[in-house]
Image (cartoon, coloured by chain):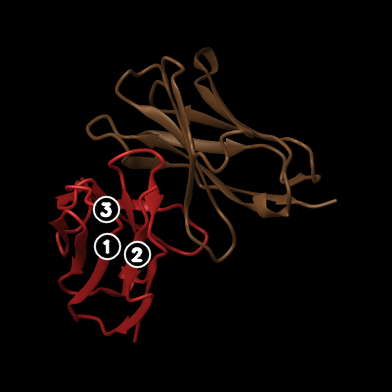
Amino acid sequence: DIQMTQSPSSLSASVGDRVTITCRASQGISTFLNWYQQKPGKAPKLLIHSASSLQTGVPSRFSGSGSGTDFTLTISILQSEDCGTYYCQASLSVPFTFGPGTKVHIK
Amino acid sequence: QVQLQESGPGLVKPSETLSLTCTVSGGSIRSDANDWTWFRQPAGKGLEWIGRISATGSTNYNPSLKSRVTISVDTPKNQFSLRLTSVTAADTAVYYCARGTDYVSGVFDYWGQGTQVTVSS
């Protein structure tokens, strides 16, 4: 199985800040990497697929980059509604695996 | 708008079988372009992919659960189901069903709201 790690595990930032979350795969996965946002008590929401493709309806302040083993999710101008937990997910092959998550708090 | 809704018992006894159903509305489960997937998430923990089924009935399962899992599809009812046998407390989690997108494999664009399943006597 492909193991996914994320850093940091949590962060606290102010509205308007630029936020970057990193994700690393245990082996090369090309651009088969997706990002989800999850709020407490809710299902995950797809933000980015294929490392850098913004899902329809997701605000353009979210962006993704990377290939191979190292990836980043960037929120260019943090908004209050962006609090939650962010997960990366590898989709190169089954079993599909997720990172442990990064909790984003708003100061 | 595609919607998914999980249903099933919220409490299952140890060693028994967990059975959940996901009802799809606003779209056809017959679509060759999509597959249909189950996930779970223990309280305060991360997401685990359980397995998926295509409209043709082809399945893939997580090896960690493979011996205990069956996913099936009921196309007339536009539903798919999860069976997990010989459950233990470690199977206590929120269970989600989701749709795999029609443009990239292994990406999930529509999710159910999730259903809590507790394994306890």
Q: Check disc 3 and give the amino acid type.
A: Gln
- Label 2 crowd bin: few (<14), some (14–19), many (20+), radius 10 Å: many
Q: Chain of mark 1?
A: A
What is the chain identity of the residue bearing mark 2? A
Q: Dot 3: few (<14), some (14–19), or many (≥20) neighbours within 10 Å?
A: few
Chain B visual colour: brown
Please provide percent x and percent y for residue A53.
15, 48
Instruction: Give the x, y percent position of residue B46.
Output: 48, 59
Find disc 1 in the rendering and name its residue. A24
Residue A104, by quadrant, is bottom left
Circles 2 and 3 on the same subunit: yes
Q: Is residue A34 above or below residue B58?
A: below
Disc 2: which residue: A5
Q: Amino acid at mark 1?
A: Arg
Report which residue position mark 3 lands on.
A27
| Real-space Cα separation, disc 1 to disc 2, in angstroms | 5 Å
Q: Is residue A25 visible?
A: yes
Q: CA distance from mark 2 to mark 3?
A: 11 Å
